[in-house]
């Protein structure tokens, strides 16, 4: 994959600080794309927010764009950069109802091939008037095992008040991920921090100043649909992220900060939290999900659709299936987690049944379970004044209780159905680590050994390592985390993970990496085993 500059992106200096203009009007220099002069005429739609692709399979994929005005989305695909004899796809009309965003599904694509695409935005009243095309690429999934698979994953973007800082290169972690030429990026939740305002400056421990690009929508917690949309737009101000998006397709899931810290369905925000005038978390979640569906290409979500879901399985050839979980929409209320029955749990009964069914149907060598929260790391929730549990583990090392009961049921199912090749990947806790789960160490032993790998944050505060809960027998084989809380991206501790599946041997190699790409930890797993 080529990662040379394309010239299509607005430079850092074109981004205005401290005003709505920063998020509403990115300046593109005339002729920046090096295209024919006819494309550069004024008064035509522009796509300064870049392009994205997502949920790519062997023969299909989604392409996303945002216009600066009403426009018809048109996608052209080609096997080469020359776009000789392109195939054309007529996309949706982009308007204010979707914040001028749109997604076009491409189908009938060749498997295991590099697809070059360009997006044209046409004047709805005069299709001959089109803006400058914006280009991107992605690889479709292979149908032959020997092709191999490589992808990266991480989460947690612009959290704890640490936003886009041009002084340190913005979201520079995307450069390191892009250099690995991954087949896709698994974005493991907390894709925005809707509850995390960003100020122009923040103090650093050494007396320095962290300088953020700011926008009006990031000046307060998100409550309105416009404010949620502005949170997603904020990240696209970063040119490194836009460049990455144009060349690496995504598989995206959400966690809590797309709505509010530690949220759950039915929650009502206390009157004492004066940041919020909207007290119903369900109302906030509906607005957040709508904005999420507008700003990410997700195959199971459609902007404005009444029904949709975040959980899904993406099949990436004979070697890999990715099972994307949603640990938010169906969970019960956060509590101390000590109940001896818990049929709803963190997944809900319907999603658990779906996961069991899809795992048993999978014929892929590896089944990656993309979990937006860890299993054996204790994640407390004190937002409501009590010592509640936010994730699965509740700190009691004994037999499963609370949400652990549902995970125990799943692990037992995997064992007794002899499902091979399960690996858990997650983010959420703002450090990187590798845990091996072993029944001989566990209070609950009716499962086969498995690995869980944690990465992140991408650009957020880093935190000390979470405590382990011994119920499922985790051993922390590797960890890198700061000793103090909320360490800024300027001080390091930003992480991503890489998964590389060899087409010949079928071995899966996990590498935990720092933001510059340097490898911290490596683990090689052998195929065909129920547990290891």
Image: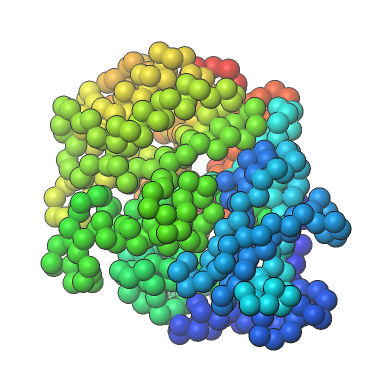
How are the residues colored? rainbow
**Residue depicted at x 41% and y 48%:** 308
**Residue depicted at x 25% and y 56%:** 282
- Between residue 337 and residue 252, name the one nearer to us: 252
- In this view of the protein, can residue 242 be seen by the observer? no
Left or right: where 29 falls relative to 484: right
**Residue depicted at x 21% and y 60%:** 280
**What percent of the width, then of the height, locates residue 404?**
27, 30
What residue occupies the far front of the structure in this picture?
Answer: 125
- Between residue 288 and residue 172, name the one nearer to us: 288
**What percent of the width, then of the height, locates residue 346?**
29, 38
Q: Quadrant of residue 140?
A: top right
Q: Quadrant of residue 243?
A: bottom right
- Between residue 230 and residue 215, name the one nearer to us: 230
Left or right: where 96 falls relative to 472: right
Vertical arrangement, residue 145 with respect to residue 323, above or below: above
Left or right: where 330 falls relative to 296: left
**Residue depicted at x 46% and y 58%:** 303
């Amino acid at each position: 994959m080529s990662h040379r500059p394309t010239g299509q992106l607005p430079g850092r200096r074109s981004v205005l600080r401290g005003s709505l203009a920063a998020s509403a009007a990115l300046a593109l220099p005339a002729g920046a794309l090096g295209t024919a002069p006819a494309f550069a005429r004024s008064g035509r739609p522009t796509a300064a927010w870049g392009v994205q692709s997502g949920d790519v399979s062997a023969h299909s994929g989604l392409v996303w764009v945002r216009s600066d005005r009403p426009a018809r989305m048109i996608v052209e695909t080609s096997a080469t950069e020359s776009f000789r004899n392109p195939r054309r796809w007529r996309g949706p009309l982009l308007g204010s109802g979707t914040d001028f965003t749109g997604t076009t599904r491409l189908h009938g694509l060749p498997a295991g091939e590099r697809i070059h695409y360009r997006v044209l935005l046409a004047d709805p009243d005069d299709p001959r008037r089109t803006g400058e095309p914006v280009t991107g690429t992605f690889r479709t999934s292979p149908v032959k095992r020997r092709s191999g698979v490589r992808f990266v994953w991480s989460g947690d973007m612009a959290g704890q008040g640490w936003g886009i800082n041009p002084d340190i290169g913005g979201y520079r972690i995307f450069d390191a991920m892009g250099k690995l030429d991954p087949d896709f990026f698994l974005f493991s939740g907390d894709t925005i921090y809707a509850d995390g305002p960003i100020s122009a400056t923040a103090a650093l421990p050494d007396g320095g100043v962290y300088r953020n690009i700011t926008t009006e929508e990031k000046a307060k917690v998100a409550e309105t649909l416009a404010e949620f949309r502005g949170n997603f737009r904020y990240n696209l101000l970063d040119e490194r992220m836009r460049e990455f998006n144009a060349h690496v397709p995504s598989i995206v899931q959400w966690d809590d900060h797309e709505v509010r810290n530690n949220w759950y369905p039915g929650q009502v925000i206390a009157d004492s939290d004066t940041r919020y005038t909207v007290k119903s978390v369900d109302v906030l979640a509906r607005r957040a999900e709508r904005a999420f569906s507008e700003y990410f290409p997700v195959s199971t979500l459609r902007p404005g659709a009444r029904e949709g879901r975040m959980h899904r399985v993406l099949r990436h050839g004979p070697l890999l299936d990715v099972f994307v979980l949603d640990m938010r929409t169906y969970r019960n209320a956060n509590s101390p987690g000590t109940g001896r029955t818990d049929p709803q749990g963190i997944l809900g009964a319907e999603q658990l049944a779906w996961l069991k069914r899809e795992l048993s149907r999978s014929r892929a060598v590896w089944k990656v379970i993309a979990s937006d929260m860890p299993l054996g790391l204790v994640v407390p929730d004190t937002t409501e004044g009590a010592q509640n549990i936010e994730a699965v583990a509740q700190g009691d090392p004994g037999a499963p209780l609370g949400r652990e009961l549902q995970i125990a049921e799943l692990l037992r199912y995997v064992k007794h159905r002899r499902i091979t090749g399960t690996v858990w990947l997650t983010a959420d806790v703002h450090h990187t680590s590798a845990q091996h789960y072993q029944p001989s160490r566990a209070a609950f032993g009716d499962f086969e050994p498995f690995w869980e790998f944690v990465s992140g944050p991408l650009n957020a505060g880093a935190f000390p390592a979470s405590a382990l809960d011994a119920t499922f027998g985790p051993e922390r084989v590797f960890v890198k985390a700061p000793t103090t809380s909320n360490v800024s991206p300027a001080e390091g501790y930003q992480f991503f993970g890489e998964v590389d599946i060899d087409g010949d041997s079928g071995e899966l190699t996990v590498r935990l990496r720092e933001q510059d790409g340097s490898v911290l930890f490596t683990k090689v797993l052998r195929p065909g085993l129920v547990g290891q």
